[in-house]
């Protein structure tokens, strides 16, 4: 099976003439639409599709339109439910929009997938839960989880005729229908007078060249999505369906809408909402007789969120139970990256990957690495699993990176944490090479890096720290190489002026100016070098003097003030001391938490 990747996205040049003869499915406009990209459909025969932007409503749609079933992504349709349960389908991502709009009541989930939302709602005693799902994995979910899921079109489902529900939910469905306005009106007929309609869909505004990534390809899903709604149209379809209270919000590539005929209050505090999810997942961990693949899918997601929220004891407990279950289903090899990854590298289809290991195994290795690093303090084990995660992610992404989105998002964090462990252990060559790669290529969407993109906070928190540590340890050749790579990163993202004292001061004076996390690092690194070259004398350093001046002037800056004051104090000490600075050789680093998908 040919794999469609971000490399296959062909961004259309801006002087291409608008295309006439196509009606926008979002607003009905027949105004000529502007081509913005071309991309092959994800499944054979990979028809080349052109994405057009409506000049009237800014939604985007395909020419020619072609909508297929997601289970056609792999040759083995019966295995697709495992991929969905273990890797593709989100539990937290599915549940939290519902909880944000309603705590309990009757629930109708249209396009419910495997039934995660229904299972949560039913198991936690929140009310009746019914789903509609045309794909085959909906039938499997109904059977495995004991759910009511109808495998027919909503408007043709006799048992639901005339029914009203407190919550009607359709997540990532509206982009698959022929007419979004009519779909919203259809759903409105099932919403109780005081009920809430909840919709999610990819955002048309996310489709820009600046967001070129695997996430963008997944949002496009060529051949599966007919169109992507603009934020304006997304809100309008709910209002046109008779809802007077509409709240639509955008979260990166995803937009979520809550609509009601009466005033409503949303609960968007994820920490509060996650308590209910944890209770549900804990109860599912204790369920006797649950299919092992489903149990593992729930346990993996529970482990992920426990690690991301820093719950040490529960994370270690769930990690041990999940490891035991994986050994039972796939053998001890599944916990040994050095033995398993070569097998993954031979797989050519999703079904083959599923026979070798759980689909979540690359991300699972990453979590085991985090447990070993943070709480077990086992450096060797942490390094084994971080390296194993990287290799497994690279192997699986060759089949299709968009099928392993969560794993791909962890590639740079896994590489970086492995590099920082190398740095702490004095393995300067490998650590410097990887951190230089992070600074130079972490913002590039390339096949060499499984089309993974590094979050800027990862680059900006770790690369400067590592360069300073290398300098403190007298490894100036590596430190300078890393600093140079970081300076290039600053130029690309913030401009040349952010490497100069005048440019930094100007940026700090402008409240809306984008700037790196540690705005003074280029000057600080230069000052470090000046202090070493002074050879025991107080350095005559323009860079250190600039840091002192900037620290005084902007000591109360709302974002950078604390760091500015600290560096100004340290710079003053260096300028006043006649003895060479005493550098600490220890490494302690804190990485940004990885956001769950």
Image (tube, grey):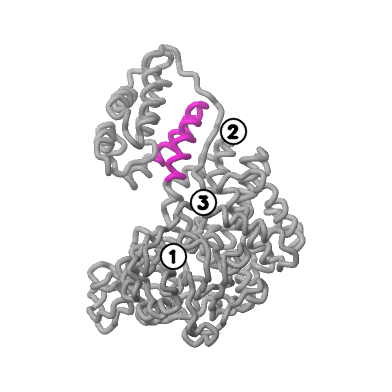
Where does the image place residue 176, in percent across and percent down from the top left? Answer: 43, 77
Query: Rounded to the nearest whole Å, what is the CA distance between mark 2 and mark 1?
Result: 37 Å
Mark number for residue 236?
Answer: none
Where does the image place residue 154, in percent across and percent down from the top left? Answer: 49, 82
The answer to whether residue 37 of the structure is visible from this angle is no
Residue at 37% from the left image edge and 77% from the top image edge: 180
Magenta run includes residue 479: yes
Mark number for residue 426?
Answer: 2
Q: Between tags 3 and 1, which lies in front?
A: 3
* Secondary structure predominantly adopted by residues drawn in magenta: helix
Q: Which picture quadrant has residue 37? A: bottom left
Where does the image place residue 76, in percent across and percent down from the top left? Answer: 62, 78
Q: Which sits earlier in the primary sequence, circle 3 or circle 1?
A: 1
CB of mark 2 within 8 Å of CB of mark 3?
no
Q: Between tags 2 and 3, which lies in front?
A: 3
Q: Is residue 43 left or right of residue 396?
A: left
Q: Which sits earlier in the primary sequence, circle 2 or circle 1?
A: 1
**What residue is pinned by disc 3?**
272
Q: Which sits earlier in the primary sequence, circle 2 or circle 3?
A: 3
**What residue is pinned by disc 1?**
6
Q: Which residues are magenta?
A: 457-486
Within-10-Å neighbours for mark 1: few <14, some 14–19, many 20+: many
Query: Rounded to the nearest whole Å, what is the CA distance between mark 2 and mark 3?
Result: 42 Å
The answer to whether residue 366 of the structure is visible from this angle is yes
CB of mark 3 within 8 Å of CB of mark 1?
no
Residue at 58% from the left image edge and 44% from the top image edge: 310
Q: Taking 88 as reference, is 517 above or below it?
A: above
Where does the image place residue 53, in percent across and percent down from the top left? Answer: 29, 72
**For the residue labelled by badge 2, is the local secondary structure a helix, a strand or a loop?**
loop
- Quarter of the figure with the N terminus: bottom right
Of 180 and 163, which appears nearest the observer? 163
Q: Which picture quadrant has residue 257? A: bottom left
């Amino acid at each position: 099976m040919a794999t469609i990747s971000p490399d296959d996205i062909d961004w259309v040049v801006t002087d291409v003439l608008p295309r006439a003869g196509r009606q926008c499915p979002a607003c009905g406009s027949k105004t000529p639409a502007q081509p913005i990209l071309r991309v092959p459909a994800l499944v054979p025969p990979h028809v080349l599709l052109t994405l057009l932007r409506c000049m009237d409503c800014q939604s985007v749609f395909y020419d020619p339109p072609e909508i297929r079933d997601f289970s056609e992504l792999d040759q083995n349709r019966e295995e697709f439910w495992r991929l969905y349960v273990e890797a593709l389908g989100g539990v937290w991502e599915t549940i939290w929009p519902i909880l944000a709009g309603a705590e309990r009541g009757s629930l109708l989930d249209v396009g419910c997938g495997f039934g995660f939302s229904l299972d949560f709602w039913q198991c936690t005693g929140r009310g009746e839960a019914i789903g509609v799902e045309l794909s085959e994995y909906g039938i499997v979910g109904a059977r495995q989880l004991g759910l009511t899921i109808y495998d027919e079109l909503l408007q043709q489902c006799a048992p639901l005729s005339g029914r009203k529900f407190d919550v009607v939910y359709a997540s990532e469905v509206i982009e698959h229908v022929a007419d979004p306005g009519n779909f919203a009106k259809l759903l409105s007929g099932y919403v109780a007078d005081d009920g809430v309609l909840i919709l999610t869909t990819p955002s048309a505004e996310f489709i820009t060249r600046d967001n070129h990534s695997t996430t963008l390809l997944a949002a496009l899903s060529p051949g599966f999505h007919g169109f992507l709604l603009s934020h304006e149209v997304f809100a309008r379809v709910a209002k046109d369906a008779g809802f007077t209270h509409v709240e639509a919000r955008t979260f990166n590539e995803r937009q979520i809408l809550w609509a009601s005929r009466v005033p409503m209050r949303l609960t968007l505090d994820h920490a509060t909402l996650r308590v209910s999810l944890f209770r549900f997942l804990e109860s599912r961990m204790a369920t006797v007789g649950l299919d092992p693949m489903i149990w593992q899918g729930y346990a993996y997601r529970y482990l992920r969120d426990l690690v991301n929220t820093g719950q040490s004891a529960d994370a270690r407990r769930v990690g041990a139970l999940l490891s035991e279950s994986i050994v039972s289903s796939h053998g001890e090899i599944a916990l040994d990256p050095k033995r398993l990854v070569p097998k993954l590298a031979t797989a050519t289809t999703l079904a083959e990957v599923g026979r070798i290991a759980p689909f979540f195994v690359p991300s699972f290795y990453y979590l085991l690495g985090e447990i070993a690093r943070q709480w077990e303090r086992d450096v060797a084990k942490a390094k084994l699993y971080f390296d194993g995660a990287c290799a497994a992610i690279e192997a699986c992404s060759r089949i299709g990176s968009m099928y392993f989105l969560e794993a791909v998002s962890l590639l740079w964090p896994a590489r970086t944490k492995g590099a920082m462990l190398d740095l702490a252990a004095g393995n300067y060559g490998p650590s410097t090479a990887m951190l230089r790669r992070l600074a130079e290529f972490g913002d590039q969407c390339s096949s060499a890096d499984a089309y993974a993109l590094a979050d800027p906070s990862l680059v900006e928190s770790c690369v400067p720290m590592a360069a300073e540590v290398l300098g403190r340890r007298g490894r100036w050749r590596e430190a300078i190489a890393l600093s140079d790579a970081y300076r290039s990163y600053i130029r690309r993202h913030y401009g040349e002026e952010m490497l100069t004292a005048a440019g930094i001061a100007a940026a700090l004076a402008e409240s809306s100016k984008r700037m790196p996390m540690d705005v003074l690092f280029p000057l600080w690194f230069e000052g470090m070098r000046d202090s070493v070259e002074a050879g025991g004398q107080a350095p005559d350093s323009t860079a250190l003097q600039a840091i002192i001046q900037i620290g005084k002037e902007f000591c109360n800056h709302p974002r950078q003030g604390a760091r500015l004051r600290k560096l100004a104090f340290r710079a003053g000490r260096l300028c006043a001391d006649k003895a060479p600075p005493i550098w600490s050789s220890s490494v302690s680093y804190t990485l940004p938490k990885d956001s769950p998908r």
